[in-house]
Image: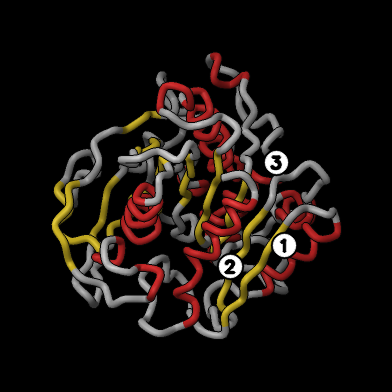
Amino acid sequence: MLNRRGALATFVTGLLASGLARGAKAETLPMTDPTEIIELWPAGPPGAAKVTAVEAVIERGDPDGLRDRALTHTRKPTLVVFRPKTPNGAAVVLMPGGGYERVVQDKEGYETARWLADRGYTAFVLFYRLPGDGWAAGPDTPLQDAQRGLRLVRSRAAAMGFSSDRIAIMGFSAGGHIAASLTTRFAAKVYERIDAADDLSARPNLSALIYPVITMDPAAMHGGSRKQLLGPNPTSEQVVLYSPEKQVSADLPPVFLLHAADDKSVPVENSLLMFSALKAKAIPTEMHVFEEGGHGFGLRFVAGKPVSAWPGLFETFARRHGL
């Protein structure tokens, strides 16, 4: 097991330094993990009385020799900070996937954060709590961390060199469900105020949902995420509340959607449902569905595949909408 707070990352993808958007083959470069970490809850996260799970980082391995770590049983949710050399005045909060069983650290977290920081964004990787670990808030536990994290980022905007109204979120897979939930339920009261940061809005200024889990409807759901979030027998009311496509209102920010048609883990219908719901409410939205890509590719695409264009497409969308 590895310590996520200061461990040396022996390998990290060279895509970030050598033509990532062109789909170049990954290389290995030594790079130290960031050490700037913001704890979300200074007195400890709410609802911990029945939580006994032990937090750990596991190395999952990667066929190309890259780091592929994941955090399990998060006990102290944090934001890990990646500062750009030349800030562009905007920030992005990343919410990696993991099926609500773990939080992917490298592929959808640190690698994407470095890519964003290289382009001027102040990037934050959110390590959120998992709903199956016994937290009192149950399925609202990850949303508690997402709301609190967004508010903390907004509270530190001036000090960290970006605008408080230029904050995007980007979620992958189950992290995409958290990002979609924050996008649609940013005003839901899911925890009690603890300090001045909680007086700020949790509404992101832009949302990017990357091969996201969206619906809890059995017709298109990701079964593992639904079971971890809602248990084996959710009520019909829970299915509606925790399906972001059912929670779309007219005051949402612009949304970027990305999926591969051949995704065998999270059906592409998840993004299609969200896109249709957003269009019905006239929310600015853009969706890219690629023929090939599978699931969980992050920035590690296969050379020559059209899906490798997605980071540039996101960047163009973000700039067009003020980021």
Q: Residues within 10 Å of mark 3 (few under 14, many from 20)?
A: many
Residue 225 image position (x, y, % from top left):
55, 61
Residue at x 52% of width, y 57% of height: 315
The residue at which mark 1 appears reads as 274
Q: Secondary structure at mark 2?
A: strand
The residue at which mark 3 appears reads as 185
The residue at which mark 2 appears reads as 258
Tag 2: amino acid: Leu
What's the CA distance linking mark 3 and mark 1? 14 Å
Quarter occupied by residue 78? top left
| Mark toward the start of the polypeptide (3 vs 2) | 3
Residue 111 image position (x, y, % from top left):
33, 57
Q: In this rendering, does residue 51 appear at all?
A: yes
Tag 3: amino acid: Arg
What's the CA distance linking mark 3 and mark 2? 21 Å
Q: How many marks?
A: 3
Residue at x 27% of width, y 47% of height: 56
Q: Using the image, determine if residue 200 lies above or below residue 307.
A: above
Left or right, 198 with respect to 12, comes to right
What's the CA distance linking mark 1 and mark 2? 11 Å
Q: Secondary structure at mark 3?
A: loop
| Mark toward the start of the polypeptide (1 vs 2) | 2
Foreground residue among 152 and 222:
152
| Mark toward the start of the polypeptide (3 vs 1) | 3
Q: In this rendering, does residue 82 appear at all?
A: no
